[in-house]
Amino acid sequence: MALPAAAKTLVFLKLISRCLELGQRALVLVPEISLTPQMILRLKRQFGRRVAVQHSALNHTERLLQWQMIQDGGADIVVGTRSAIFSPLENIGLIIVDEEQEHTYRSESAPRYSAHEVARQRAAENGALLLLASATPSTESYYTARNGRTQLVQLTKRYGGNPLPRVQIVDMRAELASGNPREISLALEDAIHRNLEAKKQTILLFNRRGYQTMAQCEDCREVLKCPKCSVPMVYHKSAHKLLCHYCGSQLDPPPTVCPTCGGKLQYRGFGTQKAEEELAKLFPEARVLRMDQDSTAAKDAHEKLLAKFARHEYDIMVGTQMVAKGLDFEDVTLVGVLGIDSLLFAQGFRAYETVFSLITQVVGRSGRAKGTPALPSSRPPTPTTRCSTLPPHRITTPSSSRRSRTGNWACTRPSVGCVSSALPGQRKSKWPGPPPDFGIAAGAAGVQAARSAFAHFGSHARQH
């Protein structure tokens, strides 16, 4: 288990290096295409050109060339999204599933599969070490580790001994009462001003695409919904159309009257496009970058936009969950979370777990070089947002939240991550004796915590 910014990538690199020294190969999975550029850069910087990439943003020719490179034995390391688990890599010694809690590792269209389960099967068949890494592990993984089915290692310090960022939770009811109707609180506005004056960068998480999130009739109060999915359609100002974020259906131009009663439609809500517009008004001197599915639709857009942000061509980056995980920018010293409470009421039993994970992950983007404030905004503060701001020793058991006997909220969800290996005992393994059932923490200042991993990994491999 490890805090965000605990340098888990350094642990990955050390383990991959050890794996290659033993004549075996490594497979690295990341949950989103937006996380592949930085991972590929680090791997190629250390291991050269024998790194292959597999994800859906590659065109057919690129994917075929990468596939043939793997099949012909020209790649020692394969990195990619969930489909990379099917790469024709032989003699696998290590499989890493980064940010293992993400739902994107499960395919919801045919063929339906879980990358976790396929990874366990491939690890068992190859006698490989499987690592599930996260600062906010899924409840299932944490429960499995706590019950001894996988080994759990806890790391409670950030890389370089940096302290955790100071976190302020803003009650937006008080903001509204004081005359501020915006999603950006006055406290966050002041903090951004100070950050701009200090020539530092800011990341804002707002997990809603579009400009306005619903169109509602003023007379019958009906909300305009997708005819195929029955979910509210979202107005996108840049394209001047209504889009369904589930099936892609669109209405162009956006209607102005209600299709049910003929009344006037009123557009409401707040998305990343509107946040970008509001930031430009509040901070006219700042250069604002928006990162969401719309702005990154072009080929290699993730890599190009992140590179520009790294070169200080932008001062503020606002985006959806793709800005919350895996990014490492030394000059990002302020993080804000906008409208996160609305996600608590999303459909699905994992809503609280998802919100906790998002807040914890994005707070970890702040002060990776120096500890500085991070400001989640909530209306009102909830147990989930409070849990995500606590130090790791205050949060101990794997559930979202519960009430104590005194009626106060007791936080019980782990705020630190785990890496675990799970190799089914009944599978035939190349390892002599029982297959290694072993875990290593997601990050460490240095790699001292990985020594037991190397010793276990290396002793078995040498015998093999």
Image (cartoon, grey):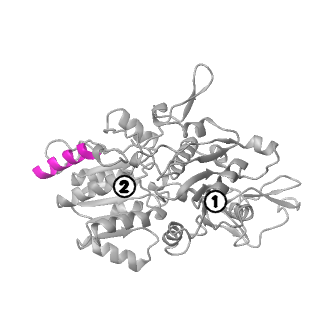
The residue under the point 51% across, 51% down is 367
- Quadrant where the N terminus sits is top left
Q: Quadrant of residue 233?
A: bottom right
The answer to which of marks 2 and 1 sits earlier in the sequence is: 2
Q: Amino acid at mark 2?
A: Thr
Q: Quadrant of residue 411?
A: top right
Position of residue 228 measured from the top left corner of the image (x, y, whole percent): 66, 61
Q: Amino acid at mark 1?
A: Glu
Q: With 235 as the anchor, is 325 left or right in this view?
A: left
Magenta stretch?
450-464
Position of residue 435 measured from the top left corner of the image (x, y, whole percent): 21, 44
Furthest residue in direction top, as rendered? 405
Q: Nearer the viewer, mark 2 or mark 1?
A: 1
The residue under the point 73% across, 69% down is 237
Question: Which element carries disc 1, helix, strand or loop?
Answer: helix
Nearer to me, 280 or 191: 191
- Quick check: can you spot residue 346? no
Q: With 280 as the anchor, is 323 left or right in this view?
A: left
Identify residue for label 1.
197
The residue under the point 42% across, 48% down is 134
Find out whether the residues at labels 2 and 1 contact each other: C-beta distance under 8 Å: no
Nearer to me, 375 or 25: 375
The 10 Å Cα crowd at callout 2, few under 14, some 14 to 19, many 20 or more, is: some
Furthest residue in direction left, as rendered? 463
In the image, residue 77 above or below residue 353: below
Give the main secondary structure of the magenta stretch: helix
Position of residue 43 measured from the top left corner of the image (x, y, whole percent): 33, 64
Position of residue 193 measured from the top left corner of the image (x, y, whole percent): 67, 56
Identify residue for label 2.
9
CA gap, disc 2 and disc 1: 32 Å
Question: Which element carries disc 2, helix, strand or loop?
Answer: helix
